[in-house]
Amino acid sequence: APIDSQTKLHLLDIEDIGSVVREILNNPETFVGHDICICGDTIRFADISKIFTKVTGKAAISKTINEEEFRLMLFEMPRAAQDDLIDSYKWFEEYIDYDKDKDWTTEQKLWKLKTFEDWLKQTRWQGD
């Protein structure tokens, strides 16, 4: 991907979202007016392949490529869609911490969410 190997990605299993939303809707007095960060795992781009290899036993690498190499991989996709993907990777690098002045790691953890490793084990995804 066109992203620095040290960029931290906040990952979330889409299946975890429902229980979080239900809790928020059932207890609005607890959550309204508060910042809520929903993240199952925060890992560096470079570590995604290491976790994938650990769980699946398949060799993998996380490779940073330039924008043109990335576009070549997406040659069948319209240019506007390519632009959107590239912009999202740039956003990850610059803004992934949402509010850079807030230390999200010290906040209360209200839900047990799946990590990337948990997700790989549960789905048995092999990268195909």
Image: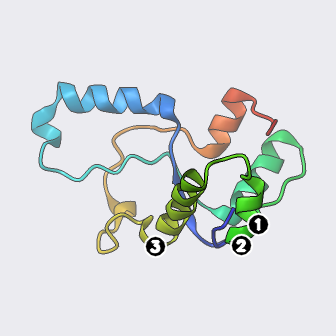
**The label number, if any, that marks residue 87 in the structure image:** none
Residue at screen point 89% across, 45% down? 58
Residue at screen point 89% across, 43% down? 57
Check disc 1 and report its element: helix, strand or loop.
Answer: helix
Say if 66 sits above or below 106 in the image. below
Q: Which residue is mark 2?
A: 66
Residue at screen point 58% across, 69% down? 7
Return the residue nearer the eye: 57 or 95: 95
Return the residue nearer the eye: 105 or 70: 70
Image quadrant containing the N terminus: bottom right
Q: Which residue is mark 3?
A: 94
Q: Which residue is mark 1?
A: 69
Q: Position of residue 66 (x, y in %)?
A: 71, 72
Residue at screen point 55% across, 60% down? 83
- Distance from disc 1 to disc 3, alpha carbons, whole Å, reads 21 Å
Give the quarter of the image for residue 102: bottom left
Give the quarter of the image for residue 126: top right
Identify residue type, mark 1: Glu
